[in-house]
Every structure is written in structure tokens, then in C-alpha cells.
Image (cartoon, rainbow, N blue to C red):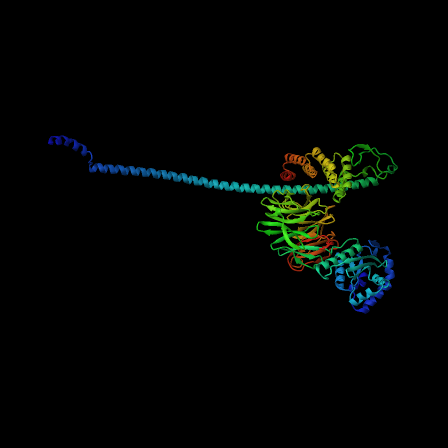
């Protein structure tokens, strides 16, 4: 039934739409009765259990109204927690907006919508109301300030924030639209919005790799090839010169990672004795070695969300595997299972923000795929199978992952919903890899 | 005057006459010289030949030694390579053993849970009526020392319903991993009190220290770690616990105490990873 009346499957021609709406209105009482057994979520929306709530994003009048509607609708869709019900054709959408709530609710309900998002452009930003379709009332209202320059990068980021807040109201979980993703292309570090817009170069001249976000959302770190080896650089993503960590001016220093409180940086330092993980206080002080690799390579540190443990890749058992240890370097534990003589290896761990899972790349028949291991029962789940997929990085919602994939023929960044398996392409110029997802950038920048 | 000359003439003739050799004399002398030269040449030739033989022998010996040396170097390389491979295989076996132990432990915990379920469901009805079974168990007091007390089980639970050590350990570890150190600590203390002879006791004691540490109870953590080192010095957890104690001391500002514990760690467990970390810590400790 949902598929039959979903408006994005209907033609734009008015007679057929009217027929569908009339049919839906006739069936509305029965559908309403059928939904008596549904569960309530957060703000009291009702919808069929086991399905995503349908959400209509109404047209927005005023300056940049179409952009606001488009961004909110797309962000909700990319969030994978609601079913965005499109309203084909401007006239139909516009006419809905003009109808009073008493008339619109049956219509929206007939489209199987649990909620409708109504945004209105104001002098300072946007006013947003969320309607509970079943309850026939407005359940949430808020005003969001927007930067005066419509369509700018910061304006778009602010509208993403509106979408995330709406998702929070409807589902109880904040969306991840108001985030950015760092990645490397052609040896340079770039940043892009979570919806693929606003790509720009971040790194200075020189071959750069392995970017990482600081928890403040505006400081980043990456490794740069210089005359004396690879050093670690920190800089503000908004601009300015990079600052080289004094302890990393010699040797092979790569894969930096900030601690959750932003005070410490872990990185791998390589020399003739092997590669070990180092920990350095960003306020000052010398680096401290935290792995004893006995000549093996220990790389790619990732802090647990509480900052007490570190996941990393180590070749101490003959080939790379993912280990976890306490942040002081003790209590090392092999995380990824392997069999004796297994030539496939696992690497590049990324700790989920909910602390329940670690994503990593694993060779299967020599081809990398994205896997997730549960820290509770150590069960492993394979998330990808098409092409070569590597370098996973979690979104702040611990549900979406950005990763590098060759499924289109060249390496591109894709975003995957780990629950539904739905993937979307983030970048379109070839050679993108080594992505890092920021925290929610809700407070400026 | 003439008479004087006449007197001297024989003397002069006699003196100069010796300076004039005959042709035969010169020929004889020449022959002697040639003979001598030929002898010397033969002698030199013989010596040269002898020296050549010696040099050749030395070359042969040098080549042999070179070959031998190459073989030794190659053998050393092979042995080192083999040893490295053996070492890697041992490490893999060690890791796999760790994995297997973990799985075995999970299986044991699962088995214990099923046994508890079976015991609960098979408990005779009079049990639920409050018949006191003669079971002795330790009190699950979180802070008190282990003490044996006789307790009556919960009315609905049979004798086998008490979780086993593996089950307790597994549940406690899960609680610790999910950020509930209080629950983890209670479970671990119950394990230590009720199953003091279990092979899980050193691990449980160590994770008790971890739980205290997560709770912010530095004294409790130090005490638990110290119990691992003193009670189970051969456990793989012992050097880790000692290292944790030292770091705890350092956090409290007790540099002397931390230094002492780190030195103790290096001396007692010189081959442990923690000893390597401790050596570096000792260098930077102020």
C-alpha cells in the first residue's frame, strides 16, 4: 500500500494524483485503525513498527526556500532513519502549504506520512515546525538563525544543522548532516560536506596523508613528507599555516589521532628499529612510546570514545592484525580473529562513537572489504562485497561509515548505512581515499 | 846510491810481483764466480718455488676459509630466518591460544549458564518452599574480605543456579567494557569470594583493579593490582599490574614510589613488554 501511494512513484499529472489522493482518503479510516497498534517515538509520532516513519518536507517560500527544502529533505533521506516522501510537482507541493492543518493532515496521512516538516524563512533565519500527522498537531517548533549569505558554505552547514535537529525530534537520534569529511586526493588533503558539496583543499604544499579531526571540529592533523622524513602537522581547517609537532621532525611519522579530550595526539613513529606508536601531550612535553613492537610495525592508532583504550594495527604476529590496548601501552589484546597460516590480514581500525563496535578493513581472498567487530561478543560482520573497499571511518551517529571503494572503477569515497546496507557516493573526482569524519559541527565553523 | 837501489830492487819486485795474476788465475776466478751465481740462482729458484707453493697453499686455505665463512654466514642467516619464523609462529600460536582461551572461556560461561538454567528448572518443588540446602558460599560483599557463610538460596533458584566462575567473569568483563565498572566490580568480587581456586582468579583480580580505576578509586585499584603481583607473581597479568601501580603512583605525584615500582618491574620481569615501557618511563620520569 505504501508503495502504491508514495508520491515519488506517482506521475506529476494532476488527474492521476487526485485519483490517488482520493483513493487514499477513502482508505484513510482503515489505515488509521490499522495503525492503532503502532509504537510512539520521542515526540509521539505513530507509524508502523519495523518501518521507517514517513516524513514530508513541505515547500519553503522565500529567499533560498527551495535550497532549504532540498537540503533538509536530502539530509533526512541520507540519515536513513526516516522515509522522505517526495511531493512531485511544484503546484502540488505549494498547494499543500496553503492548506490549513485540518485539511492537510488527512492528505499527509494518506501518503503514509508520520510527520511533516514545515519551514518558514524569517528575517534572521528559518522557523521550523514539525507536525504529528496522526495526532493532527504541531509537536515541535524552533527558530534557527542562518548566516546572511544564502548558499554559502557556512549557510549550508547551518541548514544541515536544522535537518539534524529535525531528525533528532522525529527519531530521537541527531542526524550527521552537519559534519564534514577530510580525505586525501593526489597527496593533498581536502574537506567536503557530508552531502558531497563544498569540497576544498586544506593542506599546504607537499605530499600529505592520513588526515584526522580533533574533537573541537576545527583543528585537523595530517602527516607531511619533508626533507627529513614524514612529520605530523596540525592546523585550523578554516585556514592559516600548519604547525609541525616538534617531536616529529625526523623519521617516519604518520597516522595521527587525537584523544577524545583533544589534549593528546597518538601517532606512529618509524625508524630502523621498526614502527611504534607514540603519545604526545599537545600542550608540550616529549613523546612517549606506548607499543613494544620488537621491530614490527605498529600503526593507525584510534582512541576509544572514553579515551581509555587505543585500537591499532600491528604486525607483531607476522602480518598485520587489529589489536586494542590500554592508553598507557599495557594490556594488549588481539582483537581480530585469524587462523594459523592465514595470509589475509586486517588493518585500519576505527572505533565507533558508541564504543560498541570497531570497523576495520579485512582481506578476503586478497581483496579488502569493510568489516565491523562487536566489542561485546567479538562477532564480525562484513559490510561490503563489491570492489575493493578500505579505510573505514565512522560518522558521529555510529551508524554510517565513510570508506574508499573502487566499485566504480576508480577509488572514490562512499557512505554506507551499516544497518540497511544502503551506500551513496560522496566524491566524484578520482583517487579519493583515507577519509576521516568530523564530529557534529553544531556550534559554528 | 846505486847500492841502495840494488838493495831495494828485490823487495820492490817481490812486492809488486804479487799484484800481477796470470790469465789462468782470472779464468779460474771467473769460473768460481759463475758457479757461485748459478748456485745462488738455483737456491733462489728453489726458494721462490717453495714460496709459490706456500702462497698457493695459503690461497687455497683462504678460499676454503672464505667458502666456509660464506657457508657459516648463510647458515647464520638461515638459522636467524628460521628462528624469526619460529618466533613469528610462536607469536601466532600465542595469539591463537589467547583467542582459543577466550572462546573456551565463553563456552564455559555458556555451559555454566545452561547448567544453571537446567538446575533451576529441575529444582524440586520443596526447594521453593524454603528448604535450606547445606550449601556454603562466600558473601558477595563488594568491599569486605572473603568470608565463608552459609546462605539460603533464593526461593526460586536451585543449588546450581549460582553463576559459575566463567559466567561471572564473562558478565563482569562485559560490564566493564560497556562502562559499568560498579557492576563489573561486584561480579568480580563475587567470583573471587566464591571461587578462590579458579584459574580465572588472577585475571579477575586484575580486572578488579581496572574496575576500581574506572570508578576513580585509585587506592582500591592500587590494592587490587598489588594483590595480583603478590598473590600471582607468575601470572602474565603480574607485570601489567605492576606497571599500572607505577603509573598510579606517578599520577598521584609520588615519583619516588613510581620509580621504585618501575625498577622492580624491570628487575622482576625483564622480558615483558611492560619492562620495555618501564625503562622508557624511567628515563622521562621527573
Q: In this view, does B219 lie above or below A185?
A: above
Query: Which sits in the foreground, B174 or A119?
Result: A119
**Residue at 34% of width from left, 39% of height from top?**
B45
Residue B77 falls in image quadrant: top right
Q: Where does the image place residue A285, in percent across and percent down from the top left?
A: 64, 44
Q: Nearer the viewer, residue B214 or A143?
A: A143
Does residue A270 sit above or below B253 in this rendering?
below
Specify whether A324 is left or right of A115. left
> Can residue A344 be seen at all in this image of the molecule?
no
For residue A140, above or below residue B208: below
Residue A308 place in picture, x, y as percent:
71, 44
Above-or-below relation of B257 to A57 = above
Q: Can residue A414 be seen in this view?
A: yes
Quarter of the image containing the C terminus of chain B?
top right
Q: In terms of depth relative to the viewer, which is nearer, A121 or B234?
A: A121
**Residue at the extreme left:** B2
Name the image quarter holding the N terminus of chain B.
top left
Amino acid at each position: 500500500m505504501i508503495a502504491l501511494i508514495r508520491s515519488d512513484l506517482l506521475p506529476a499529472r494532476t488527474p492521476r494524483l487526485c485519483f490517488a489522493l482520493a483513493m487514499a482518503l477513502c482508505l484513510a479510516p482503515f489505515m488509521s485503525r490499522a495503525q492503532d497498534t503502532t509504537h510512539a517515538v520521542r515526540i509521539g509520532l505513530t507509524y508502523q513498527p519495523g518501518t521507517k516513519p514517513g516524513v514530508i518536507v513541505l515547500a519553503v517560500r522565500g529567499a533560498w526556500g527551495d535550497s532549504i527544502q532540498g537540503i533538509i529533505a536530502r539530509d533526512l533521506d541520507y540519515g536513513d532513519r526516516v522515509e522522505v516522501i517526495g511531493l512531485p510537482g511544484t503546484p502540488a507541493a505549494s498547494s499543500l502549504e496553503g492548506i490549513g492543518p485540518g485539511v492537510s493532515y488527512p492528505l499527509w496521512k494518506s501518503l503514509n506520512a508520520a510527520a511533516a516538516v514545515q519551514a518558514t524563512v524569517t528575517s534572521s533565519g528559518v522557523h521550523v515546525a514539525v507536525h504529528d500527522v496522526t495526532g493532527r498537531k504541531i509537536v515541535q517548533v524552533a527558530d534557527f538563525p542562518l548566516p546572511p549569505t544564502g548558499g554559502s558554505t557556512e549557510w549550508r552547514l547551518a541548514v544541515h544543522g536544522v535537518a539534524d535537529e529535525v531528525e533528532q525530534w522525529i527519531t530521537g537520534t541527531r542526524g550527521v548532516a552537519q559534519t564534514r569529511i577530510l580525505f586525501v586526493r593526489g597527496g593533498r588533503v581536502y574537506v567536503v560536506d557530508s552531502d558531497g558539496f563544498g569540497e576544498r583543499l586544506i593542506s599546504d604544499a607537499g605530499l600529505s596523508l592520513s588526515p584526522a579531526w580533533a574533537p573541537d571540529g576545527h583543528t585537523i592533523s595530517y602527516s607531511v613528507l619533508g626533507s627529513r622524513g614524514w612529520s605530523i602537522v596540525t592546523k585550523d581547517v578554516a585556514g592559516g599555516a600548519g604547525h609541525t609537532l616538534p617531536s616529529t621532525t625526523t623519521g617516519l611519522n604518520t597516522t595521527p589521532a587525537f584523544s577524545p579530550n583533544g589534549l593528546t595526539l597518538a601517532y606512529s613513529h618509524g625508524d630502523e628499529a621498526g614502527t611504534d606508536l607514540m603519545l604526545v601531550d599537545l600542550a608540550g612535553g616529549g613523546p612517549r612510546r606506548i607499543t613494544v613492537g620488537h621491530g614490527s610495525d605498529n600503526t593507525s592508532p584510534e582512541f576509544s570514545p572514553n579515551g581509555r583504550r587505543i585500537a591499532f594495527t600491528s604486525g607483531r604476529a607476522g602480518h598485520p592484525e587489529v589489536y586494542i590496548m590500554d592508553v598507557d601501552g599495557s594490556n594488549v589484546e588481539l582483537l581480530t580473529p585469524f587462523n594459523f597460516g592465514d595470509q589475509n590480514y586486517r588493518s585500519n581500525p576505527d572505533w565507533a562513537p558508541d564504543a560498541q563496535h570497531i570497523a576495520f578493513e579485512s582481506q578476503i581472498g586478497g581483496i579488502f572489504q569493510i568489516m565491523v567487530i562487536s566489542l561485546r561478543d567479538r562477532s564480525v560482520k562484513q559490510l561490503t562485497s563489491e570492489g575493493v573497499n578500505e579505510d573505514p571511518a565512522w560518522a558521529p551517529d555510529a551508524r554510517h561509515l565513510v570508506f574508499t571503494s573502487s566499485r566504480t572503477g576508480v577509488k572514490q569515497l562512499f557512505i554506507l548505512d551499516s544497518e540497511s546496507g544502503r551506500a551513496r557516493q560522496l566524491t566524484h573526482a578520482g583517487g579519493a581515499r583515507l577519509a576521516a569524519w568530523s564530529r557534529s559541527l553544531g556550534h559554528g565553523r | 846510491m846505486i847500492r841502495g837501489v840494488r838493495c831495494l830492487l828485490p823487495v820492490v819486485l817481490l812486492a809488486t810481483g804479487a799484484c800481477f795474476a796470470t790469465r789462468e788465475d782470472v779464468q779460474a776466478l771467473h769460473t768460481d764466480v759463475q758457479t757461485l751465481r748459478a748456485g745462488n740462482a738455483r737456491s733462489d729458484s728453489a726458494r721462490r718455488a717453495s714460496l709459490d707453493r706456500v702462497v698457493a697453499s695459503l690461497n687455497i686455505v683462504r678460499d676454503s676459509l672464505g667458502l666456509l665463512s660464506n657457508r657459516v654466514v648463510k647458515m647464520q642467516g638461515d638459522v636467524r630466518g628460521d628462528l624469526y619464523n619460529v618466533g613469528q609462529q610462536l607469536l601466532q600460536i600465542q595469539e591463537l591460544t589467547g583467542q582459543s582461551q577466550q572462546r573456551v572461556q565463553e563456552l564455559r560461561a555458556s555451559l555454566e549458564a545452561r547448567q544453571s538454567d537446567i538446575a533451576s528448572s529441575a529444582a524440586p518443588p520443596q526447594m521453593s518452599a524454603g528448604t535450606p540446602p547445606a550449601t556454603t558460599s562466600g558473601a558477595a560483599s563488594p568491599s569486605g574480605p572473603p568470608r565463608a557463610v552459609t546462605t539460603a538460596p533464593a526461593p526460586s533458584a536451585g543449588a546450581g543456579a549460582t553463576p559459575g566462575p566463567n559466567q561471572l567473569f564473562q558478565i563482569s568483563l562485559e560490564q566493564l567494557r560497556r562502562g559499568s565498572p560498579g557492576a563489573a566490580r561486584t561480579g568480580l568480587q563475587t567470583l573471587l569470594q566464591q571461587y578462590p581456586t579458579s584459574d580465572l582468579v588472577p585475571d579477575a583480580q586484575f580486572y578488579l583493579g581496572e574496575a576500581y580505576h574506572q570508578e576513580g578509586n585509585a587506592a582500591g585499584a592500587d590494592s587490587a593490582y598489588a594483590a595480583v603481583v603478590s598473590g600471582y607473581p607468575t601470572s602474565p597479568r603480574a607485570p601489567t599490574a605492576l606497571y599500572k601501580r607505577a603509573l598510579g603512583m606517578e599520577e598521584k605525584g609520588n615519583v619516588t614510589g613510581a620509580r621504585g615500582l618501575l625498577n622492580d618491574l624491570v628487575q622482576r620481569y625483564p622480558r615483558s613488554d611492560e619492562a620495555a615501557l618501564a625503562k622508557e618511563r624511567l628515563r622521562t620520569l621527573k
